[in-house]
Amino acid sequence: MNSQSIYYIDIQPLNHSISMGRKSIKDIRQQEIVRALYKTAKAEGLHNASIAKVADEMNVNPSLILHYFKTKEELIFALIDYILNRYLNIYTIKNHNSAIEELTEVLNNLFSRKWNNLVSDDVYYNCFTLTFRDPVIQQKYKQLHDSLRASLEEHLLACIKEGTLQLEDPKITANLIYTIMEGAYFYLCMVPDAATRQEIMEQYKRHAFSILGIEYVVA
């Protein structure tokens, strides 16, 4: 993830502080701090990540962190925006000649290591537990997942318009495929063997293709 790709859930740049096409020092520094928190949370767990440890990761004084994020809670909000929006990158695909080819690439990405490697499972689920305590975080997660479903639905609609797919309700179908995918990744977090994880994921992907009536080809 490069330094240009940290966005809030509404896909707006952090603090909107862009002047003449360039990010401000504040934007750049905030991004650096959020990435440092991500690395610290990945190494030690979110609950063990403190302002002091983030400062150590960056080799700066903790006062610098507090200059940009007044509290750890504020910093965690920014971290959640960061990790949730990394998932939107799954729709960055090559240009294809047809909508069905684009959909096929999206499905292959969703049920693959590319999706799984976007964000550390440890950090993701650490943050996810906060949805039970904080309505703001809960809403951020919901918006992200709704957005991912809507994006898949758009691909399905494009295929229907193209005449390469026939579905009674693309919205329900998109929700079903995402439910399968999310359940798969949750379960696979508990499967230590890489080969077994890959085999199970292939099974889920085959089922997703079957739901859509698309011929499955091993990617």
Image: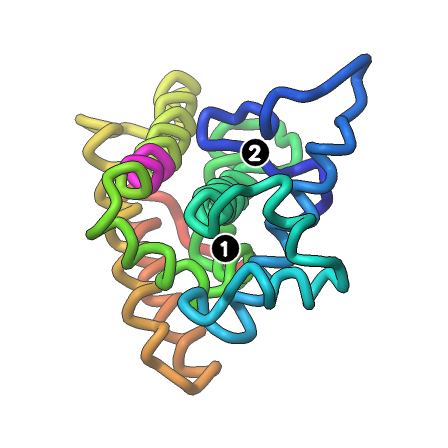
Q: Residue at x 52, y 26 (%)?
A: 11
- What amino acid is labelled 1 in the image? Trp
Report the disc number at residue 115.
1
**Which residue matches tag 2?**
7
Q: Residue at x 26, y 28 (%)?
A: 170
Q: Is residue 87 visible?
A: no
Q: Residue at x 49, y 52 (%)?
A: 108
Q: Quadrant of the C terminus?
A: bottom right
Q: Is residue 110 visible?
A: yes
Instruction: Judge whether residue 1 is colored magenta.
Output: no
Residue 3: x, y in percent?
72, 42
Q: Give the vertical position of 125 relative to 140 (above or below).
A: below
Q: Give the vertical position of 208 relative to 102 (above or below).
A: below
Residue 45: x, y in percent?
46, 71
Residues packed near mark 2 inside 10 Å, few (<14), some (14 to 19) or many (20 plus): many
Helix, strand, or loop for circle 2? loop
Q: Which residues are magenta?
A: 139-144
Left or right, 3 with reference to 80: right
* Earlier residue among tags 2 and 1: 2
User: Foreground residue, 86 or 197?
Assistant: 86
Helix, strand, or loop for circle 1? helix
- What amino acid is labelled 2 in the image? Tyr
Left or right, 167 with reference to 28: left
Q: For the image shown, how many numbered marks are present on the structure?
A: 2
